Image (cartoon, rainbow, N blue to C red):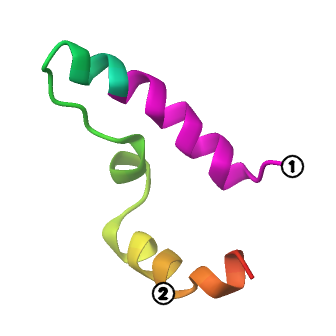
């Protein structure tokens, strides 16, 4: 069974691979939609999200 995190990572992987084939830069949605403070707290609390 997939979590929302797995689905989000799979969603990002397809356009990233396409951009890499074309040698174009790709900016991840993770960086656009989450500010730096939330991203850092997410990884700090990783054991809570994924026990």
Could you tell me how far apart the alpha carbons at marks 2 and 1 are, in whole angstroms? Answer: 24 Å
Circle 2 packing at 10 Å, graded few (<14), some (14-19), many (20+), is few
Pick whichever of labels 2 and 1 is earlier in the sequence: 1
**Secondary structure beneath disc 2?**
helix
Residue shown at 59% from the left, 43% from the top: 8
Asked if 51 appears above or below 24 in the picture, the reply is below
Please state the horizontal and vertical placement of residue 15, each as a whole percent of the image. Answer: 40, 23
Q: Is residue 42 left or right of residue 5?
A: left
Q: Is residue 8 above or below residue 49?
A: above
Identify the element where label 1 is drawn: loop
Residue, far top: 22
Q: Is residue 4 magenta?
A: yes
Residue at (45, 73) in percent of width and height: 38
Query: Outermost residue toward the right?
Result: 1
Mark carried by residue 51: none
Residue 36 against residue 16 in the figure, above or below: below
| Residue at figure coordinates x 65%, y 49% from the top left | 6
Is-magenta flag for residue 47?
Answer: no
Name which quarter of the figure residue 19 lies in: top left
Q: Report the side of 2 relative to 33 (left or right).
A: right
Q: Nearer the viewer, mark 2 or mark 1?
A: 1
Return the x and y of residue 48 as percentages of the image width and height. 69, 85
Residue named by callout 1:
1
| Residue appearing at x 32%, y 69% in the figure | 36
Please state the horizontal and vertical placement of residue 12, each as a whole percent of the image.
47, 35
Q: Position of residue 50 (x, y in %)?
A: 70, 75
Q: Quadrant of the C terminus?
A: bottom right
Residue position marked by numbered label 2 in the rendering: 44
Dot 1: within a 10 Å radius of its alpha carbon, few (fewer than 14), some, or many (20 or more) residues? few
The span shown in magenta is: 1-16
Q: Nearer the viewer, residue 21 or 28?
A: 21
């Amino acid at each position: 069974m997939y979590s929302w995190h797995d689905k989000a990572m799979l969603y990002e992987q397809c356009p990233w691979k396409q951009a890499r084939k074309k040698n174009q830069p790709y900016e991840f949605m993770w960086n656009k939609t989450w500010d730096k403070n939330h991203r850092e707290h997410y990884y700090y609390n990783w054991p809570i999200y994924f026990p």
